[in-house]
Amino acid sequence: MNQNNRLSVRKLVEFVLKKGSIDERYTGSAHTAIEGTKLHQKIQKEAGDNYQKEVFLKKELLINQRNYSIEGRADGVVEEKSGKYWVDEIKTSEIDFDLLPDNTLERFWGQLMCYGYMLAVEKELAEIELQLTYYETLNEKITRTRKKVSITELTSFFNHLVEQYEKWVIFNDNWRILRNQTLKQLDFPYGDYRSGQRELAVAVYKTILTEQNLYCEAPTGIGKTMSTLFPAVKSIGEEKAEKLFYLTAKTITRQVAEDAVEQMERNGAKLKSVTLTAKDKICFLDERKCDPEHCIFARGYYDRLNEALFEMLQQENHFTREIVENYARKYTLCPFELSLDISLWCDIIICDYNYLFDPIVYLKRFFNDEKNEYVFLIDEVHNLVDRSREMFSASLSEQKIITIYRELMKEDQKQRRVMNRLIKDFKSFRTNCGEVEFMTQSEPADLFLKHVVKFTENTKEWLLVNQQASSHSKMLELYFEALTYLKISEFYDERYVTYVHLVGKDVTIKQFCLNPSFLINQTLKRGKASVLFSATLSPINYFAQLLGGKEKPLMYQLPSPFKQEHQLLVIANYIDTRYQVRQASHQPIANALTTMVTQKKGNYLFFFPSYQYLESIYQEFVEKNPTVETVVQGRVMDEQQRELFLQKFKNRPESNLVGFCVLGGIFSEGIDLKGERLIGVAIVGVGLAQLNAEADLVQKYYQTENHEGYQFAYQIPGMNKVLQAAGRVIRSETDIGVVLLLDQRFNARRYRELFPEHWQQIESVNNDRELKSQLMRFWK
């Protein structure tokens, strides 16, 4: 049977019966999914030999003239000697059974009623017994509740569920038929393909058909967004894929994806898409508190949800942030949760990496099941290496624990005791460090982990009882940090290291992921195919290895579609920016930058490895060029400030404008200044990060793994920042501009080997006079 014609019992019950409010005070669990499975297995094993585990049950029925199968697995089925049957459903939680909300119990029994109905029909039973087994993880208490239900009652209940869901099934059927018809007729939206576009589109389509992962470098100008979206959308129309996830690290790239989807709709495609915005950004409240006491948008959320969803599906196709917010205000619903709930009905989901990769916040509604027919398009994937290390690592700090501990009332003896145990652990870490500030070990801190488990178990109860306490919000934050630490400990293996870091009075312990490739690969298995692409993925073997590629990953590099003569690449071979001689470089760099801007009036961006270096050169440059307008990237800038910065870069400028920026920062990638909005970029240094403990750990790890520790930890990540910044210059076929590389190390073989194909025509100059000559020749 077609995957689209299968309905999960659990999802059916959740959708129809879920009522009440969003309440994050009762979410989060110290016991993990793995432990939950183990508890299920333990209870099943203790139930006896005639207890059949994980029994598959289904009911086939006709909806909208199509065959559907409603399916699920009962935790246990028992046939007694008398011929009677009973069905068992096991639930595990930290909440006391007597404190469970009525609607939670209603949904538990709803699942049981469905399984009971299916088994009764299959075995032709007049009645059946249902048992709910509830295991409280904090005290290991088991509550079993039984009741007999007749086939008449079961049939009535099941039919009522189906009737409630039927209009949604019919809507989805009709939508799918319309969508598929339009997608089969959809031609490439821009008519003719640009150079490289067709090749990329074909590669993406074949990757989906063969269910593989493709690592692709598609230089600026190819139109990689449409070249990847179009074939993926066509595969949805052919029902070779169920959903498409377009994942990226930056808001501006998500906007480009939205524009591409809307362009396909203008060309006749019928698609439903949603863009997910971070919870803190889209929240309507000044201070986010996701519980019904503090938030009207959380209170009664599920009572109003389905009415809002159905109107949205009938009236809209593209659920941007603005559209989601409009309906959220109309129905008084949490906009973040509304975007997640509407995503279940969408063909395309545009979102940040963390909704797939982050082990804490990933979209469990999509990825908790086994492999699905999903396609992942992962844009700007060069960012995923550092992001994945961050997502698969976790830390806890002493000072935060001490601060909350001091705020606790003296009568909170139990909570103070578990927190004091953690504080003692941190004191032990400090003692073990001795005179050094940084200490590592290959094994996890097992005793500390046990104490963290005790803390989370007790804190769960404390949070429920002390909701009015002044320290409640701080304790809740610490609780979730502790849960994250425990979750990350599940992944701990030889690709991890534990370190303790002393900074002033604080002590931090961190489980640091050195090599995220295995975890990335495991995550990608949640879908049928993935395309991981970027304009800068050189050397591609490095990125494929770090991003989950197997021994022989599928890799594809496209040439730049632009004429090389439109861009002048120059290495200032007389500039030395190494840290030990950096002070002496200020004046030579300022002179070279002055030479650059005086040869051609226009807009320029200068990139520096640090704010300190930027500020030093800025003073020198301004003294030499008092009439040149300058704008400086702030250390912290909100979206409005960023936009004001970029708005200064106008087409057809009447005078020079120079933006001073930090390499690897917010303006070195993801911005699109076409035409004369930008005619030149200067990059100071080779992009090396300052020596730091974590990068040193990565270097040591890869030196052991492949003898390329320095390249993997410092050189290649730095060069990628350079390539990204340089890519700001040529954005279209008509753009003309200069990239000036200010560091003699760029001429070294180890760096030239990292240059992309379209960087082969590069000039080298030995003084300002030669630089001026090259610039004059290019601009004449």
Image: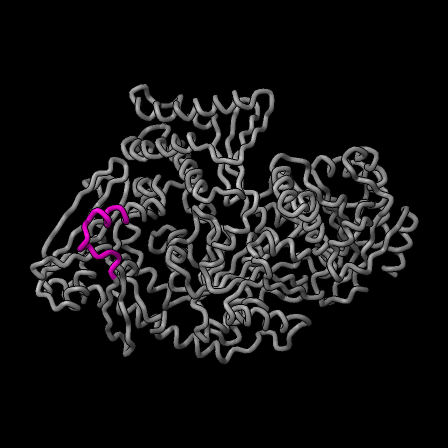
Q: Is residue 117 left or right of residue 575?
A: left
Q: Which of 326 and 193 is in front in this view?
A: 193
Q: Quarter of the image containing the C terminus?
A: bottom right
Q: Reply yes or no: does residue 51 show up in magenta.
A: yes
Is residue 341 something one can see in this rendering?
yes
Q: Where is residue 390 in the image (x, y as percent from the top left)?
A: 53, 43
Q: Residue at x 22, y 68 (%)?
A: 163
Q: In this view, does 202 lie above or below 702?
A: below
Residue at 32% from the left image edge and 31% from the top image edge: 458
Magenta residue span: 41-55
Q: Which residue lies furthest to the front in this view?
A: 49
Residue 222 sits in quarter: bottom right
Place of residue 199 in the rendered image (x, y in percent of width and height, measured from the top left): 63, 72
Question: Considering depth in this image, is 501 or 244 the residue closer to the camera?
Answer: 501
Residue 748: x and y in percent read: 81, 48
At a point 43% along the width and 76% down the height, the residue shown is 180
- Establish if 415 lies above or below 80: above
Here the colouring is: one colour
